[in-house]
Image (cartoon, grey):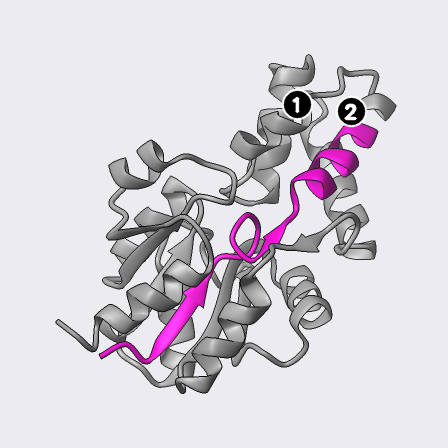
């Protein structure tokens, strides 16, 4: 029986691609480096802000990461100041969350965003819809380590096998598997079906309402 749905944030609940690209490219320009195409950020993201900065710097003209420490600090500071910049909720997500709520499903968010920023974004976008939100901190290893979803399950008082873990990248699928949870890969985010299936997605959702249908499957098997 599924008692909880645990969602990734960027690329799953909200489209943050333009937000990440705008902040990073502004920083690259200040450092005298190349600005990178927005689509590149689909592959820069997924393993935390620091990794995004590393990947962007290398492609932008700093393969030795000379500017890394300076860049990561500025990037984090700017996101902390305005984590909602150019962020928008994916169509169909509010309706999905409402339907799951009606069915008594517990809801959580696990993000590789810094914890305070993750909490701020989820609160601003969804109010009190989620029972628990956890982001990256010194106490929680970033995904694909299972620390965050396991902490969420603990806080929600459910077992890992009673959870659906939902995300848009191969890293998310690895995270859900490492936590011994059922995994759903979504196609409206930053990666493709091939990556999600290769990394172990149990199901693929083409639109948000597919998640409701997958949840309901557990009551008809």
Query: Residue 11's mark?
Result: none
Neighbourhood count class around disc 2 (C-alpha, 10 Å): few under 14, some 14–19, many 20 upward = many
Where, by quadrant of the figure, is residue 34 drawn? Answer: top right
Residue 169 on the magenta span: no
Residue 115, image x and y in percent? 61, 63
Instruction: Please report the bounds of the magenta region as a residue range.
Output: 1-27
Q: Secondary structure at mark 1?
A: helix
Residue 24 on the magenta span: yes
Q: Residue tagged by mark 1?
A: 57
Residue extending furthest toward the right: 30
Residue 118, image x and y in percent? 63, 62
Residues tagged 1 and 2 counted as in contact (Cβ below 8 A): yes
Going 26% across and 78% down the picture, which residue do you hit? 159
Residue 213, image x and y in percent? 33, 66
Q: Secondary structure at mark 2?
A: helix
Q: Residue tagged by mark 2?
A: 28
Label 1 or label 2, whichever comes before in sequence order: 2
Residue 73, visible in the rendered structure: yes
Q: Nearer the viewer, residue 171 or 76?
A: 171
Q: Does 26 appear above or below 13?
A: above
Quarter of the picture containing the N terminus is: bottom left
Residue 144, visible in the rendered structure: no
């Amino acid at each position: 029986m599924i008692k909880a749905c645990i969602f990734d944030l960027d690329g799953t609940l909200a489209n943050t691609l333009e937000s990440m690209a705008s902040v990073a490219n502004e920083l690259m320009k200040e450092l005298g480096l190349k600005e990178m195409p927005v689509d590149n950020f689909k592959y820069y993201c997924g393993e935390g802000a620091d990794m995004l900065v590393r990947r962007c710097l290398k492609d932008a003209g700093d393969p030795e990461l000379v500017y890394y420490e300076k860049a990561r600090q500025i990037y984090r500071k700017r996101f902390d100041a305005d984590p909602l910049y150019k962020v928008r909720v994916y169509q169909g997500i509010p309706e999905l969350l409402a339907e799951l709520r009606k069915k008594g499903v517990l809801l959580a968010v696990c993000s590789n965003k810094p914890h305070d920023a993750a909490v701020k974004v989820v609160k601003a976008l969804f109010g009190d819809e989620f029972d628990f939100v956890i982001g990256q901190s010194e106490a929680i290893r970033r995904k694909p380590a299972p620390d965050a979803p396991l902490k969420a399950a603990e806080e929600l008082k459910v077992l890992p096998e009673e959870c659906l873990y939902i995300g848009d990248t191969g890293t998310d699928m690895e995270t859900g598997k490492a936590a011994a949870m059922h995994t759903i890969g979504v196609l409206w985010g930053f990666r493709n079906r091939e990556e999600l299936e290769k990394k172990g997605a149990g199901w693929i959702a083409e639109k948000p309402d597919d998640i409701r249908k997958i949840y309901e499957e557990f009551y008809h098997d």
